Image (cartoon, rainbow, N blue to C red):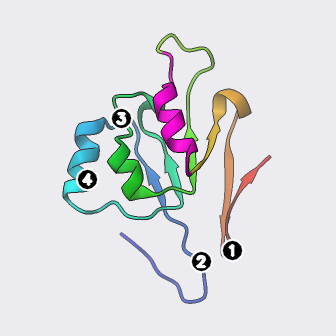
Amino acid sequence: MEYTYSGIKETTILLTGDIGSDIEQELLDADVISDIDILKVAHHGSKSSSLPKFISAAQPELAVIQVAEDNRYGHPHEEVLEMLSAHTQVIRNDYLGTISLRIDNEGYEIQE
């Protein structure tokens, strides 16, 4: 559901949880992915998610990766990081700790 208010900047956020590339493809096929502001990167930045065409369709300004430091799975995957960082600001909680965003009428900002 989308809400639009006159005079207020809309901030779009996509919270992907642990979806895989199969669900990303379904979302692409349904044509429901378009330019967004903030993307919670799927499945800790694993290479089983974040299809290049999914990221290209979403065009996120900010990508948030929630991942444990030095995890045994090697997340986030280097290929995913390279793809995202080419056009997107990437922030990770294994480097920053708790990530907080402030979203208001002006847009969003990362809280330190």
Estimate the x, y position of residue 54 in percent, counting from the top left. 35, 49
Q: Residue at x 67, y 69 (%)?
A: 104
- The residue carrying mark 4 is 27
- The residue carrying mark 3 is 49
Residue 73 is left or right of residue 110, and the answer is: left
The reply to whether discs 3 and 2 touch (Cβ–Cβ < 8 Å) is no
- The residue carrying mark 2 is 9
Residue 11 is left or right of residue 48, and the answer is: right
> Crowdedness of circle 2 by 10 Å Cα count: few (<14), some, many (20+)?
some
- Check residue 105 for magenta coloring: no
Q: Residue at x 51, y 26 (%)?
A: 78
- The residue carrying mark 1 is 106
Amino acid under disc 1: Glu
Query: Which label sits in the foreground, 3 or 1?
Result: 3
The reply to whether discs 3 and 1 touch (Cβ–Cβ < 8 Å) is no
The reply to whether discs 2 and 1 touch (Cβ–Cβ < 8 Å) is yes
Residue projecting furthest to the right: 112
* Callout 1: SS: loop
Q: Which quadrant is home to the N terminus?
A: bottom left
Estimate the x, y position of residue 40 in percent, counting from the top left. 50, 45
Amino acid under disc 2: Lys
